[in-house]
Image (cartoon, helix red, strand yellow):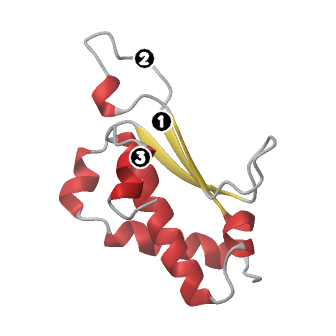
Amino acid sequence: MEMSAERFEELVSEALDEVPAALLSMMDNVVIVVEDAPEGPDQNLLGLYEGYALTERGWDYGAVLPDKITVYRLPTLRVCDTEEQVVEEVAVTVVHEIAHHFGIDDERLHALGWG
């Protein structure tokens, strides 16, 4: 599947628009970015959450860089055959990584169908 970086970013934005506003308003000190591919050996990674989940933040949390949610374009396009599949995969990836921000681990996400 081929798709421009601009179109992929639009799909990520549209996926974020589908997240309930109440949930988005609870997110704190987090940025969401799109990159072509992950660095390192796992080139099949569709998304990545880096930071301190809200459940891990204590009284001493402060003066830190924002958490970062990254959605990777090229690995996502490799696992999809149509734009409709990309839309679905991006939505799942966005929800999955946001869930990590709220302290939900991979095991629970898989059990909920957001793996």
Mark 1 and mark 3 in contact? Answer it, CB < 8 Å.
no
| Residue 107 - label | 3
Q: Is residue 3 above or below residue 95?
A: below
Amino acid carrying mark 1 in the image: Asp
In-front residue for pair 37/29: 37
Number of callouts: 3
What residue sits right under mark 2 in the picture?
63
**Looking at the image, which residue is at 34% across and 42% down?**
104
Q: Position of residue 106 (x, y in %)?
A: 44, 46
Label 3 vs label 2, nearer the camera? 3
Amino acid carrying mark 3 in the image: Glu
Q: Is residue 21 above or below residue 17?
A: above
Going from the N terminus, do you reach mark 1 or mark 3 first?
1
Amino acid carrying mark 2 in the image: Ala
The picture quadrant where one finds residue 8 is bottom right
| Residue 67 - label | 1
In-front residue for pair 110/37: 110
Say whether residue 72 is left or right of residue 95.
right
| Residue 38 - label | none
Q: Give neighbour class at mark 1: few <14, some 14-19, many 20+ (Cα, 10 Å).
A: some
Label 1 vs label 3, nearer the camera? 3
Q: Give neighbour class at mark 3: few <14, some 14-19, many 20+ (Cα, 10 Å).
A: few
Rounded to the nearest angstrom, the CA distance separating label 3 from label 2 is 31 Å
**Looking at the image, which residue is at 67% across and 54% down?**
45
Q: Give neighbour class at mark 2: few <14, some 14-19, many 20+ (Cα, 10 Å).
A: few
Q: Position of residue 23 (x, y in %)?
A: 23, 54
